[in-house]
Image (spheres, rainbow, N blue to C red):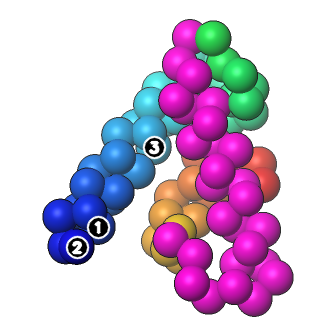
Amino acid sequence: FEWRINHNLETWNERYNELVNYVKRFGHARVPAKFADNPSLGKWVTSQRSLYTKIQKGNSSCVITIEQIQLLNKIGFEW
């Protein structure tokens, strides 16, 4: 079970770094849901928005952390 948590964090960090590179390239963090250059990034961005919405509605069992939300906010992520 611990491996899964570490794996999820590793995947999150990989996608975050891809998003940082996307922002550097395009000047914004509005990755299309079906981004042809990187479909995984498009799906991930959609997933982050969904998780954030759940937290806003009071669901405390979400797998996105406050620290991750802050990192996304730092690069201009649009929820």
Which one is earlier in the sequence, the residue at label 2 or at label 3? 2
- Are there few (<14), some (14-19), or many (20+) residues within 10 Å of tag 1? few
Residue 39 tag number: none
- In 3D space, how far apart are the residues under numbered discs 1 and 3 (Cα atoms)? 16 Å
Which of 15/63 is in front?
A: 63
Residue 24 percent coordinates (x, y)? 54, 24
SS state under label 2: loop
* CA separation in Å, label 2 and label 1: 7 Å
- For label 3, the residue is 16
| Disc 2/disc 3 C-alpha distance (Å) | 23 Å
Front: mark 1 or 3: 1
Residue at screen point 52% across, 29% down: 40
The amino acid type of the residue labelled 1 equals Ile
Report which residue position mark 2 lands on: 1
Q: Would residue 2 be seen by someone viewing this image from the given angle?
A: yes
In this rendering, the label closer to the viewer, 2 or 3: 2
**In the structure shown, which secondary structural element does the residue marked by tag 3 occupy?**
helix
| Amino acid identity at mark 3 | Tyr
The residue depicted at 73 percent of the width and 30 percent of the height is 33
Q: Can you give x and y, in whole percent of width and height, for residue 48 in the image?
A: 63, 54
Task: Find the residue positioned furthest to the front.
Answer: 1
Please report whichever mark, 1 or 3, sits nearer to the chain's N-terminal start. 1
Residue visible at 17% across and 64% down? 3
Most prominent secondary structure in the magenta stretch?
helix
- Secondary structure beneath label 1: helix
Magenta segment boundaries in residue numbering:
37-63
Residue bearing the label numbered 1: 5
Residue 13 in view: no
- Report the residue that reaches farthest toward the right: 57
Q: The N terminus appears in which quarter of the rendering?
A: bottom left
